[in-house]
Image: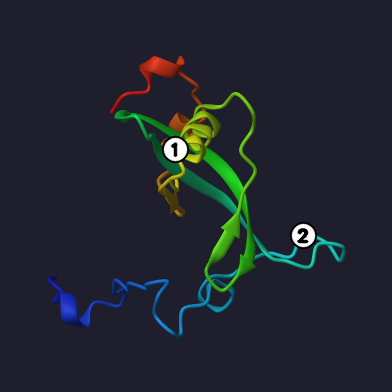
Amino acid sequence: MVVPASSAPCQEQIFLADDPDFDLRTLLPGAHQHPYRRRPFFCLGLALASDPDDASLTDVTIHRLCVQGRDELSMFLAAGRHIEVFRQKAEAAGKPLPITINMGLDPAIYIGACFEAPYHAVRL
């Protein structure tokens, strides 16, 4: 059976942060952990970033993301981890660090993200 893409039950949707109706708080379900944390969290977000000085050096790490506003998330970057080194380099250069947040991935990708290679071995 072939289902034409236009009538498939699942359709790709693209949301851009600069759209006036964009709001993370309404687009994605965020769990409220307990009464003392007033902001919702997204769990198991896989962050991907590259070294600002050498884009072939990359890092993927798993994070819990706190929704701060309609288009803003925060996450803790542990000292000494590759992605934190990338952030420090970008900050020293006065530039933002582009990061992608990926959710709902194949479990094998999350398992692979738990492996921490030596710093100069994280090339794609």
Q: Left of 109 or right of it: where is 77? A: right
Q: Is residue 124 shown above or below 63?
A: above
Give the residue type at disc 1: Ala
Residue 105 is situated, as x and y percent measured from the top left of the image, at 42, 49
Residue 26 is situated, as x and y percent measured from the top left of the image, at 56, 78
The residue that disc 2 covers is: 33
Q: Is residue 73 shown above or below 100?
A: below
Q: Quadrant of the N terminus?
A: bottom left
The residue that disc 1 covers is: 93
Q: Left of 106 or right of it: where is 36? A: right
Q: Quadrant of the C terminus?
A: top left
SS for dot 2: loop
Q: Is residue 71 shown above or below 109?
A: below
Query: Which is in the foreground here, disc 1 or disc 2?
Result: 1
Task: Name the outermost residue toward the bottom.
Answer: 21
Q: Quadrant of residue 60?
A: top left
Q: Residue at x 24, y 77 (%)?
A: 8
Q: Residue at x 48, y 45 (%)?
A: 46
